């Protein structure tokens, strides 16, 4: 089994994984960080979105070995010194979550949208950019509002 | 109103753990020594099992055990059941075929579970499952519900001749026939209510753990009602008596009905744990499994007719529905197309004569049961499509048609069981029309036409019955359980409070709204209230969350328990303050003695109750803890008006929803922010049904929509922002005046969309989902006219 190491939420981690181990399974199984979720098996739902070397990816569609040496950020790494990231705060303030299952992926995707599209986001831009994230609870209404508000405060 | 009391837009207490990745869903839990369960499932829709050879698989690396239906039978593991008895017109009981936890003799749908492999890792379990050799004799599949009752159709269950589970009726047939004979106009619609996959984002999961030392089982499961799961697994499956089985439903990532039911996998994980020597067994559905095995929703084929007089007054409604139950009767499947459906066929209208017949049929497809709204979306779809179509045929404005027929006085007894207790249907209609600027529609339609778009507007004036439900009433209709709710209020010596509730939150925000109720009543901050739910060892019993019952029924139980807390605390306070109990008043969190300046804060009284120094414990027991069971006296009747405006691209058939107004009457509202969120989500699911979603099987029973590549979940860019408004007629049947809000959007939305669609296209019907292809086909007449 290949040995890999990476930086996850600023912490050096390592482990032995099978070649077929997915990044999400390494994060959830080996590291015990269960904030990143798996909602489908076809890379559609986006519950597993994390940041790898600064870019949002679906961790269900990346092999752990392919991320050897990478810097990975998950939802658990967003708050600093107990202070929530503005995007986390915005999801709470705008009731952008209900069951919470898609939420980590939505927050990670939302931050990535801001990185790529800037802090002033139009509603239609956010809706288009959320193509890869499915929510069944909110009808997206408040998620769109949360990302717009979170973006402005980032 | 305080900022944490009833009516406050309080931010959710549960959010912190979800936004920081600290939610605790079933798959996030790992027990020491845990193994995985992997289900070998049928590749055939319908086949006899001739032989299952597991010898090689049992010896495969890492395998702890391989179990089949034969083993289940040998261990006396019973099947899962349907808990609602429906009788046919002729008085005969419904024909429920057996539903073993692992197939015995026959598989009845693609995905039916044939064997389970328990191994140390998923890779080992999957590899071993490949080594199981099942010899099938493939049979013809029965997939089309309409054809399933015909002679020669393949029989799914021996017990159900012509695949018919029941042939049920409701209403006065003779009177309704007479109304149709005398009608000035009859409107007829043939409607298909498309089959949907619920698709909670968290797939179902279970961990079964057997403790040989205590002969005790623990089940972690993605359930909306853990106590009912325990009851069924104990009393019907017969795995273990209730005191030997603990069921925990931790954070659950959405349910929408699909997690009400007791599924075979949960039972198998428990049983397999014992067979594997007490090793905990975890199973997590992948999405493909969810599509194959989660109970689906809807799937009705209906001919519906509306009789009207010359002025557009409705004189009768009749419907004949074929309801697809799938291959097995799921937990509450039989109640959905009967008492949750046809009892709402009066809509918001005064309809003197109603008659409905429902044939429930088996097919070789996954089971169908309650999905958000459960029967009521199907009813609203029938009624609202009929009324809108009748208005068009009679050349009456659709709003005016509705006004002429609205129920105006309450209580109103419909011809189909329900007694509406409160409402103001004109109020929600008027407000919605104002919000969407109904008067300006023709201008907007003309402007759309100039850019090649066909613009339509559609109403849906839904009513539903929720707050489910009075136990005696549902019992008389066939329910195997009562539908009350329980609550326990535990006041700690320092005055903080724990609420134990039988309701279960899987996105609804109970930790917030229930705390708001307590804050309001006891005058303590909401952060001093903890809500405990989802664990049969902590909460004594409960009926769970579905049918928008947690507010009207669950919170009323809490409210009753709080009454008892207040009464006892008054006694304690009276003794401590040396006053007569009748002189003690409780207001804003403190007890005071009338006409004096004597006062005690709630926390001080709580401490006194536990210290027990200053009252006679021979008369008043120490402590401050009370429980209550609440059984409602009626259903509640949320109602409202949703109006959809959409534009269809005449060149491509692509639809865009350009405006949406929802005006709902939910009675009193605890937290408007949470209620609005519920409405948004419901509308999105209803729009999904109308425009994008459908479960499709091919004629051999293979599922064509087995992933998110093929089953089109609404994405953010399929939906608009929604404009919401509220009216309020308090619900008279509970002290909080709550009606419920969880399902309204999903009930209202499909008819609003399709009324708008048919208005835009100038056609009588477009099949749901109105995909660009279906819309394109429905526009043939426009293309012909243009040529």
Image (cartoon, coloured by chain):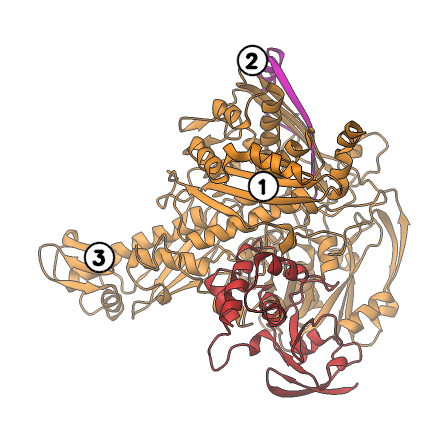
Chain colours: A red, B orange
Q: What element carries label 2?
A: loop
Task: Please report, as a chain letter, where disc 3 is located.
Answer: B
Task: Please report, as a chain letter, where disc 2 is located.
Answer: B
Is the same chain shared between marks 2 and 1? Answer: yes
Q: What element carries label 3?
A: helix
Q: Is residue B677 magenta?
A: no
Badge 2 is on which residue?
B310
Residue B749's disc number: 1
Residue B570's disc number: 3
What residue range appears in magenta? B168-195
The residue at the point 72 percent across, 48 percent down is: B99
**Can you say which quadrant of the picture contains the N terminus of chain B?**
bottom left
Whether label 3 touches label 1, CB < 8 Å: no
Among numbered discs 3 and 1, the one appearing first in the sequence? 3
Among numbered discs 2 and 1, the one appearing first in the sequence? 2
Going by the picture, which residue comes out furthest to the left? B595
**Can you say which quadrant of the picture contains the C terminus of chain B?**
top right
Percent coordinates x, y for residue B132 in the rendering:
86, 64
């Amino acid at each position: 089994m290949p040995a890999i190491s990476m930086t996850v939420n600023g912490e050096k981690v390592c482990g032995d994984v099978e070649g077929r181990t997915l990044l999400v399974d390494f994060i959830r199984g080996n590291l015990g960080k269960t904030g990143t979720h798996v909602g489908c098996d076809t890379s559609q739902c986006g519950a597993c979105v994390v940041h790898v070397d600064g870019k949002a990816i679906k961790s269900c569609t990346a092999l752990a070995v392919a991320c050897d040496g990478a810097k990975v950020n998950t939802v658990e790494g967003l708050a600093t010194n107990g202070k929530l990231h503005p995007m986390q705060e915005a999801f709470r303030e705008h009731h952008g979550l209900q069951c919470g299952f898609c939420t980590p992926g939505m927050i990670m995707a939302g931050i990535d949208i801001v990185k790529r599209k800037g802090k002033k986001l139009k509603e239609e831009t956010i809706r288009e950019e959320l193509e890869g994230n499915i929510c069944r609870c909110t009808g997206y209404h408040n998620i769109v509002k949360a990302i717009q508000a979170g973006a402005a405060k980032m | 109103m305080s900022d944490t009391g009833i009516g406050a837009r309080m931010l959710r207490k549960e959010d912190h753990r979800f936004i920081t990745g600290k939610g605790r869903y079933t798959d996030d839990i790992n027990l020491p020594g845990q193994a995985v369960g992997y289900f070998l499932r049928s590749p055939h829709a319908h086949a006899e099992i001739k032989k299952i050879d597991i010898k090689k698989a049992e010896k495969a690396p890492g395998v702890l055990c391989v179990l089949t239906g034969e083993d289940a039978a040998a261990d006396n593991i019973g099947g899962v059941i349907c808990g609602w008895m429906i009788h046919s017109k002729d008085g005969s009981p419904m024909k429920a075929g057996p539903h073993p936890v692992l197939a015995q003799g026959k598989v009845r749908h693609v995905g039916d579970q044939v064997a389970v492999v328990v191994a140390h890792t998923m890779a080992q379990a999957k590899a071993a499952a490949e080594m199981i050799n099942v010899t099938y004799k493939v049979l013809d599949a029965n997939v089309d519900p309409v054809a399933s009752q015909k002679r020669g159709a393949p029989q799914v269950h021996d017990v159900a001749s012509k695949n018919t589970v029941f042939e049920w009726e409701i209403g006065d047939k003779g009177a309704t026939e007479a109304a149709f004979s005398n009608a000035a106009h009859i409107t007829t619609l043939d409607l298909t209510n498309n089959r949907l996959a619920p698709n909670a984002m968290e797939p179902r999961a279970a961990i079964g753990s057997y403790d040989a030392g205590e002969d005790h089982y623990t089940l972690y499961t993605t359930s909306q009602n853990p106590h009912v799961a325990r009851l069924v697994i104990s009393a019907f499956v017969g795995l273990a008596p209730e005191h030997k089985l603990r069921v925990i439903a931790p954070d659950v990532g959405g349910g929408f009905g699909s997690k009400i039911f007791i599924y075979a996998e949960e039972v198998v994980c428990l049983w397999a744990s014992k067979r594997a020597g007490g090793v905990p067994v975890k199973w997590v559905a992948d999405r493909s499994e969810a599509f194959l095995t989660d109970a689906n929703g809807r799937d009705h084929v209906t001919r519906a007719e509306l009789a009207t007089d010359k002025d557009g007054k409705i004189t009768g409604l009749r419907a004949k529905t074929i309801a697809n139950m799938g291959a097995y009767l799921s937990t509450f499947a039989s109640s959905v197309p009967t008492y949750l459906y046809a009892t709402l066929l009066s809509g918001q209208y005064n309809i003197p004569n109603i008659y409905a017949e429902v044939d429930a049929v088996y097919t070789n497809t996954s089971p169908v049961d309650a999905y958000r709204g459960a029967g009521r979306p199907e009813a609203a779809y029938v009624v609202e499509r009929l009324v809108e179509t009748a208005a068009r045929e009679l050349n009456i404005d659709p709003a005016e048609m509705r006004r002429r027929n609205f129920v105006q006085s309450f209580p109103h007894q419909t011809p189909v069981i329900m007694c509406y207790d409160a409402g103001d249907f004109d109020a929600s209609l008027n407000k919605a029309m104002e919000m969407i600027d109904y008067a300006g529609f023709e201008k907007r339609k003309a402007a759309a036409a100039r850019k090649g778009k066909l613009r339509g507007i559609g109403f849906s004036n839904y009513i539903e019955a929720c707050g489910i439900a009075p136990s005696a009433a549902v019992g008389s209709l066939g329910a195997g359980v009562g539908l009350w709710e329980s609550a326990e209020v535990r006041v700690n010596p320092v005055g903080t409070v724990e609420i134990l509730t039988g309701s279960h939150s899987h996105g609804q925000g109970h930790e917030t709204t229930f705390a708001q109720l307590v804050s309001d009543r006891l005058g303590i901050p909401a952060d001093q209230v903890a809500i405990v739910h989802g664990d049969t060892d902590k909460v004594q019993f409960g009926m769970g969350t579905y049918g928008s019952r947690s507010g009207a029924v669950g919170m009323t139980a809490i409210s009753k328990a709080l009454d008892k807390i207040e009464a006892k605390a008054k006694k304690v306070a009276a003794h401590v303050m040396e006053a007569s109990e009748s002189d003690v008043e409780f207001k804003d969190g403190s007890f005071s003695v009338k006409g004096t300046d004597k006062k005690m804060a709630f926390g001080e009284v709580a401490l006194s109750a536990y210290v027990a120094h200053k009252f006679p414990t021979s008369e008043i027991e120490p402590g401050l803890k009370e429980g209550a069971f609440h059984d409602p006296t009626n259903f509640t009747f949320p109602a409202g008006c949703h109006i959809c405006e959409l534009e269809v691209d005449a060149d491509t058939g692509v639809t865009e929803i350009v405006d949406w107004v929802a005006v709902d009457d939910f009675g009193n509202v605890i937290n408007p922010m949470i209620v609005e969120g519920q409405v948004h989500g419901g509308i999105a699911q209803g729009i999904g049904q109308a425009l994008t979603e459908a479960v499709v099987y091919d004629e051999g029973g293979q599922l064509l929509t087995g992933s998110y590549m093929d089953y089109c979940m609404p994405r953010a860019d399929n939906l608009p922002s929604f404009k919401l408004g509220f009216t309020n007629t308090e619900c008279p049947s509970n002290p909080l005046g709550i009606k419920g809000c969880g399902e309204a959007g999903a009930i209202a939305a499909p008819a609003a969309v399709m009324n708008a669609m048919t208005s835009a296209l100038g056609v009588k019907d477009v099949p749901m989902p109105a995909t660009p292809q279906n819309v394109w086909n429905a526009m043939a007449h426009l293309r012909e006219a243009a040529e």
